[in-house]
Amino acid sequence: MEHQKKMAESKAAITYNAASDFFDNDALSFWNQFGKSSVNRLNLKTGMKVLDLACGSGASALPAAESVGEKGYVVAVDLADNLLSLGRNKAIKRGLHNIDFVCKDMTLLDYPDASFDAIICVFGIFFVADMSAFLKKLYSMLKPAGKLMITTWGPDLFAPVYDIWRQEVKKLRPDLYSSFNPWDRITEVHSVKELFHSAGIPGVDVAAENNLHPLRDPEDWWKIVMGSGFRWTIDAMGPKESMHLHDQNIAWLKSHRVTAIKANVIYAMAVKPLI
C-alpha cells in the first residue's frame, strides 16, 4: 500500500510539473474561475489563517491571500514544484507577502488541531485514497467556527469531447486507457454528502453548478489536455501517437462544430461548531 501511494504521488508530481507549461494558458481559465468562486463562498475575513491544498499555481490561494489581507496568512500546498513557482511569481506581481507555497504531500501535513480558520481543496480531494479519513483530519485542523471548502468536478466532465478522447486513447494505446478516473467517485451531490457523513462532519452545504467552458477554437481543447492531468497520457505516448490523437480530436471538434465543453462542479462547505 505504501509503495502504491508513493507511485501515485510520483505520477502526480511528474504529470503536473510537465503540465505547468500550459497550466496557466487562457484555455484553462476554469482553474481561476472555480478557484475564485470557491474562495468567494467562504466569505473570508481580514486576519484569517487559511490552508489551501492541491493549490496548483494559486487559483484559490491567491484570492484567499487577497481576502485575508496583510494580517492574515495562507499556506498553499502542492506536489508540483513547477506549479508552485508559477504561484510564487504571481504572488510577487500582486504584491502579496502573506502567502507561503509549500511542496509537500497534503496527506502528510502535521498541523495541530484548531490551526486554521478555513481549509480549501479545489479539484484535489479525489486524488486521496481514503478521502473520508483525510476529511476527518482536515476538520480537526479547523478552529471553532472554521470553514472547510471542498470543490470537485460534477458529472460529464469536458463532454462531449472527453468521450472521443478516451475512445481514441483506447484504440491507440489500450495500455494507457482507463475506464475509471479519480474524480468519478464523487461527481454527484449525494456522493459528496455521503463522503462528509462518513467523515463524521455534520451540516455540510452541497451545491451543484452546471457550466459550459468556451473553446475559442478546437486547439483550445489540446491546450487543456497539455495543461491538465491528461498530460500523463500524452507524455507516455511517442510523438507519432500523440500527434495522431491530436489530429483525431481536433478533426472531430471541427466536424461537430463544438464551441464549448461541460465543466460542471460541486461545491461543499462545512462550518465547524463553536463548541
Image (tube, rainbow, N blue to C red):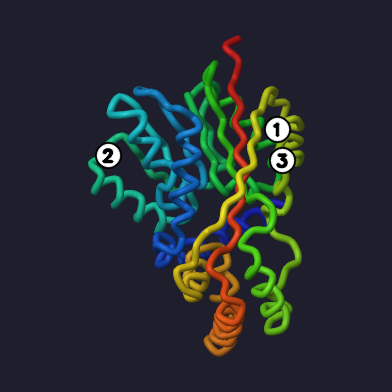
Q: How far apart are marks 2 and 3 (CA)?
A: 35 Å
On screen, residue 269 versus residue 65, left or right, reads right
Q: Which residue lies furthest to the top in this view?
A: 275
Residue, disc 1: 196
Q: Check disc 2 and report its element: helix, strand or loop.
A: loop
Q: Check disc 3 and report its element: helix, strand or loop.
A: helix
Which residue shows up at 51% across the image and 73% down it?
222
Q: Up-down: is 208 above or below 70?
A: below
Q: Distance between the residues labelled 1 and 2?
A: 33 Å
Q: Residue 189 carries which label?
A: 3
The amino acid marked with disc number 3 is Val
Q: Residues within 10 Å of mark 3 (few under 14, many from 20)?
A: some
Residue, disc 2: 96
The spot of residue 272 in percent (x, y) is: 59, 20
Q: Up-down: is 215 above or below 186?
A: below
Q: State which quadrant residue 86 falls in.
A: bottom left
Q: Along the polypeptide, which appears first: circle 1 or circle 3?
A: 3
Q: Residues within 10 Å of mark 2 (few under 14, many from 20)?
A: some
Q: Distance between the residues labelled 1 and 3?
A: 11 Å
Q: Along the polypeptide, which appears first: circle 1 or circle 2?
A: 2
Q: Along the polypeptide, which appears first: circle 2 or circle 3?
A: 2
The amino acid marked with disc number 2 is Leu
On screen, residue 194 versus residue 114, left or right, reads right
Q: Which of 243 and 13 is in front in this view?
A: 243
Residue 39 makes an appearance in the image? yes
The amino acid marked with disc number 1 is Phe
